[in-house]
Image: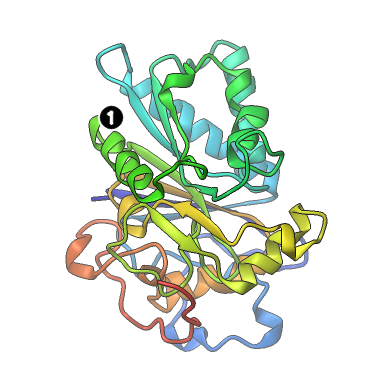
């Protein structure tokens, strides 16, 4: 199970800065409308092995996240018989991290020759070459710029003839790789990670998901604002898949995600979308409670 979870986030420029590790009481969970955008509401007081690193802007988030990745890879000293395994996200949030990692690679500070990667998700039914596919995203923004072998990059195939078998093989390949050392993710405003909406099973594995209507509407901006073009299904890693990683690093940028993270950390609802039962995670999530009823359940 995960030995640690790290949140990297940036502050809204209009918020009063607070120390990153101050404690807030559970009475603070009843946020006013004006408080919902304040990243200052987060702390790690309920989690012995969760770290919140609060940074000034989104570029700093990418910079520090990239430094952590480089440090983890180099400390692991991967070789042809011992690969370092990363779980990777897509979207706008990790772009600055990928840009920094490319810079570190070009400067000779890290190599991805003995790194294997597993991406979190992929749409069903659009070609891998489609500009909005996550295959295209990873190639454009990361893989083509580093020395990783394409056979060591694992992205779910949303056009596989048997989607259930594709998901099973993906999980099998993670196990064969020795498990994920560091899983990097982001969260949506409602707390979803990958395509695991609030209410997803805590023990879920990689599977086919029907996308929530809100998710489809939100993603329309990537498809010429045409809802009809947005895929209605996706393949996604499960909550259980994520939590099996040795470490998890969550990147959070944008005040719209403040409420989700506040509820997660202060109100003990993190296991609703990326956590697990207290007895299942003795380390990073052992003190979380089940007060997650305020999140709207969508799909399982």
Farthest residue in the left direction?
Answer: 279
Q: Which residue is mark 1?
A: 177
Between residue 276 and residue 18, name the one nearer to us. 276
Between residue 125 and residue 59, name the one nearer to us. 125
- Which quadrant of the rendered structure holds the C terminus? bottom left
| Picture layout, residue 144 above or below residue 261 | above
Q: Residue at x 52, y 72 (%)?
A: 262
Q: Residue at x 47, y 36 (%)?
A: 155
Quarter of the figure with residue 253: bottom right
- Please indicate whether residue 50 sits to the left or right of residue 222 in the image: left
Question: Which scheme is used to colour this image of the protein?
Answer: rainbow
- Total numbered labels: 1
- Where residue 232 appears, as percent x and y from the top left, is 59, 62
Few, some or many residues within 10 Å of mark 1 (<14, 14–19, 20+): some
| Picture layout, residue 253 above or below residue 70 | below
Q: Residue at x 65, y 42 (%)?
A: 60
| Picture layout, residue 261 above or below residue 239 | below
- Please indicate whether residue 7 sits to the left or right of residue 49 in the image: right
Farthest residue in the front direction?
Answer: 161
Quarter of the figure with residue 86: top left
- Where residue 26 appears, as percent x and y from the top left, is 43, 84
- Where residue 30 appears, as percent x and y from the top left, is 54, 89
Q: Helix, strand, or loop for circle 1?
A: loop
Q: Residue at x 32, y 23 (%)?
A: 76
């Amino acid at each position: 199970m995960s030995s640690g979870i790290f949140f990297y986030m940036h502050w809204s420029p209009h918020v009063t800065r607070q120390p990153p590790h101050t404690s807030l009481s559970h009475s603070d969970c009843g946020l006013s409308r004006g408080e919902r955008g304040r990243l200052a509401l987060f702390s790690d007081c309920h989690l012995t092995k969760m770290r919140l690193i609060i940074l000034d802007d989104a570029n700093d988030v990418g910079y520090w996240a990239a430094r952590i990745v480089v440090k983890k890879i180099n400390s692991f000293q991967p070789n042809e018989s011992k690969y370092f395994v990363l779980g990777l996200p897509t979207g706008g949030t990790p772009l600055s991290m990928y840009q920094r990692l490319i810079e570190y690679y070009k400067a000779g500070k890290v190599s991805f020759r003995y790194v294997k990667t597993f991406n979190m998700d992929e749409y069903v039914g659009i070609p891998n070459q489609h500009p909005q596919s996550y295959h295209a995203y990873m190639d454009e923004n990361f893989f083509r710029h580093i020395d990783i072998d394409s056979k060591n990059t694992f992205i779910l195939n949303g056009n596989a003839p048997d989607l259930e078998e594709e998901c099973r093989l993906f999980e099998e390949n993670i196990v064969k790789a020795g498990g994920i050392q560091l899983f990097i993710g982001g969260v949506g405003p409602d707390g979803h990670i990958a395509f695991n909406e609030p209410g997803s099973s805590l023990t879920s594995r990689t599977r086919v998901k029907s996308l929530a209507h809100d998710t489809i509407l939100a993603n329309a901006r990537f498809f010429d604002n045409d809802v009809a073009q947005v895929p209605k299904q996706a393949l996604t890693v499960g909550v259980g898949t994520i939590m099996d990683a040795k470490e998890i690093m969550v990147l959070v940028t944008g005040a719209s995600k403040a409420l989700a993270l506040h509820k997660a950390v202060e109100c003990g609802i993190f296991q609703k979308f990326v956590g697990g039962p207290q007895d299942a995670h003795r380390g990073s999530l052992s003190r979380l409670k089940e007060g997650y009823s305020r999140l709207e359940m969508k799909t399982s």
